[in-house]
Amino acid sequence: MTGVRARTNCASSPRRIIEELGTFLDASAAPVVGIGGRRTGLADAWTSYEQALVAVRAARRLPHLKGLGDWAELGEFAVLLQLPEYALNAALRPQPLRALAEAHGGARLRDTLRCFLDNAGSIPRTADAPQLHRTSLYYRLRQIREITGLDLDNGADRLVLYMGLRVEDLLATPGEQARV
């Protein structure tokens, strides 16, 4: 029981640190904390440190993390955030997503695409998520295919679109953060 309690206390400590620092800093200095992966020996401590640095970048760029980045929970962001800072810019957005953004109704189509990809391409789950009729969903998916020129049944094309949406999340300012 003590081990469980200690783990819970350790997990809540970074959030408490952020809250405490917030009381001492002005509103413009938002503290962030990055947590690296666990390592068994001192020789691997550098790996955890590098992961913590990536987690800090995530905490700075992703408002939904509320200042706390944990390597173990970053998923695909852990890969993208290992790119050099100068590479994380609008040029990293795939052309098909740029075309979608510029199209009439692009924001609505992008939200539909995100929901479709988040639901692993499942039409029933995607149609249920935003309370969208299947006929409308099929129409929007056809529009997305036409605008992007990509096949949503192709895994590589879906990966390009999904990672592109994640890049947009990293590039968005907190006020324009894409819905997740």
Image (tube, rainbow, N blue to C red):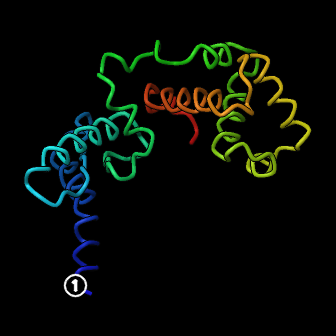
SS under mark 1: helix
Question: In which quadrant of the rendered image does the N terminus lie?
Answer: bottom left
Rendering coords of residue 140 (x, y %): 82, 30
- Tell me which corner region of the image, top left, top right, bottom left or bottom right, holds residue 13: bottom left
Rendering coords of residue 62 (x, y %): 41, 38
Question: In which quadrant of the rendered image does the C terminus lie?
Answer: top right
Question: Residue, x 88% and y 36% (percent of image)?
Answer: 136
As shown in the figure, which amino acid type bears the numbered disc 1?
A: Thr
Question: Residue, x 35% and y 32% (percent of image)?
Answer: 81
In front here: 160 or 90?
A: 160
Residue density around tag 1, few if under 14, some if 14–19, many if 20 or more, within 10 Å: few
**Could you tell whether 179 is left or right of 16 in the image?**
right
Above or below residue 146? Residue 48 is: below
In front here: 64 or 113?
A: 113
Question: Residue, x 8% and y 50% (percent of image)?
Answer: 43
Question: Residue, x 51% and y 32% (percent of image)?
Answer: 166
Residue positioned most to the bottom = 1
Rendering coords of residue 169 (x, y %): 49, 32
| Residue that numbered label 1 is attached to | 2
